[in-house]
Image (cartoon, grey):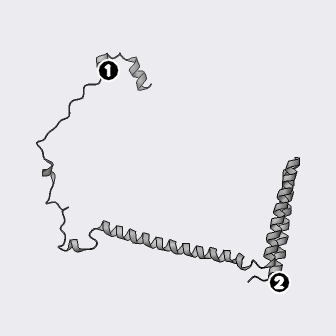
Amino acid sequence: MSYADAAAKGPKQSPEDARAPPVGGVYHDESESTASLIDVDGPHVQTVESGFLENDVQTTTQAERIERESEEKEKEKRETEEKKKRAKTQKVKSSGICENSSNPVFIANAAIATVVGAGLGFGAYKQHARGNLSWEMVGLSAGAVGIFGAVDYFVSKWFLQNKFPPK
């Protein structure tokens, strides 16, 4: 049995009993002063040396802040060095294409990729316009492109190693 069930079986309260008692006023006592609560003779008061203000670092909080700032500067320095290295690596990678732009194997591969891509796109559009484009046809075309790409890779690799080595 719950408390609510037990209370419901008992006698009913009158409206006067159901109300909460009135809250008293706020008590103000101005006779006591908080200044008397400070104990200057306690062990928490510390003295400092006379040259305290001339020190560069006066508190442990300042020392921690200076240490954090130096770590952040060091981290920023490392990050900028890494960015410079990555930018240099990117420049080296992109310059490989420019250096070999006169190589006939690179030119032939670019032309073949363009022709095959345009041909497949146009063929797929025509099949779609006729209503004959299916997933089976798309899968067979993708397989043919994969086989052609593998053959082209090995033929190009052979040409680059034997006939037209990169600069």
Task: Return the disc, 2 or 1, that comes first in the chain's sequence.
Answer: 1
Residue 135: x and y in percent read 84, 51
Q: Which kind of residue does numbered mark 2 sit on?
A: Asn
- Residue 86's place in the image compared with 35, above or below, is below
Q: Residue at x 47, y 74 (%)?
A: 77
Q: Quadrant of the C terminus?
A: bottom right
Q: Quadrant of the N terminus?
A: top left
Q: Residue at x 80, y 80 (%)?
A: 160
- Residue 152's place in the image compared with 1, above or below, is below
Q: Residue furthest front?
A: 102
Q: Residue at x 35, y 16 (%)?
A: 12
Which mark is on residue 156? none
Residue density around tag 1, few if under 14, some if 14–19, many if 20 or more, within 10 Å: few
Residue 3 visible within the image = yes
- Identify the image quadrant of residue 41: bottom left
Q: Are marks 2 and 1 in contact (CB under 8 Å)?
A: no
150 to the left or right of 28: right
What residue sits right under mark 1 in the picture? 18
What residue sits right under mark 2 in the picture? 162
Residue density around tag 2, few if under 14, some if 14–19, many if 20 or more, within 10 Å: few
- Identify the image quadrant of residue 155: bottom right
Residue 10: x and y in percent read 37, 17
Which element carries disc 2, helix, strand or loop?
helix
Q: Nearer the viewer, residue 47 or 147?
A: 147
Q: Residue at x 27, y 73 (%)?
A: 56
Residue 5: x and y in percent read 43, 22
